[in-house]
Image (cartoon, rainbow, N blue to C red):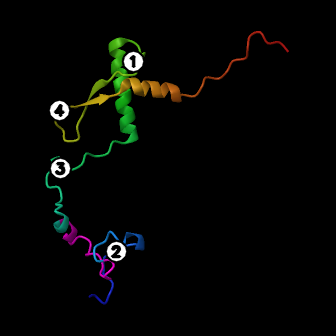
Amino acid sequence: MPTEPASSPVRARPSDAGSVPNARAGTSSPPAGSGCWGRTLGVEPADTAAEQPKPRTTHADKWSLDLAAATRYYERDGHLQVPREHIETVGVPPAGGEGPEQRDVRLGTWISNQRSRAPAPPRSPSRGSSS
């Protein structure tokens, strides 16, 4: 049994005691980066780019994609009276530099949400009111 605390910066909280093996016996977690947990659980790091997770889409990127879909729809149909169920397919340049990647955009839902969240227009004074 170790007599000194482990050099790992990760410490188990008392609420985690049941989930950390040997926590009740007084032993500490293995040092970070030792790979002990990976071997125990059978987890290996991703080797290829195909196994890596996709980069997150930022809010600005999502807005640009939705706006591009609306522009494409408007240029093709001449209006933005989009049915709520409509899905527009838009080509997006990939990060890898290959051909464009096709993405489906729920354009009808996006347009409907933009309209419902827009601020109300200012009220004009009524025509027939006289003081």
The residue beneath circle 2 is 9
- Highlighted magenta segment, given as a residue range: 23-38
The residue beneath circle 1 is 83
Q: What element carries label 2?
A: loop
The amino acid pointed to by label 2 is Pro
Q: Is mark 1 on a helix, strand or loop?
A: loop
Inter-mark Cα distance, 1 to 2: 54 Å
Q: Which residue is drawn at 37% across and 25% down?
A: 107
CB under 8 Å between callouts 1 and 2? Answer: no
In the depicted structure, whether residue 94 falls above or below residue 118 = below
The amino acid pointed to by label 1 is Pro
The residue beneath circle 3 is 51
Residue 124: which disc? none
Inter-mark Cα distance, 2 to 4: 44 Å
Q: Earlier in the sequence, mark 2 or mark 4?
A: 2
* Numbered disc in front, either 3 or 4: 3
Q: What element carries label 4?
A: loop
- In this picture, residue 112 sits left or right of residue 17: right
Inter-mark Cα distance, 3 to 4: 20 Å
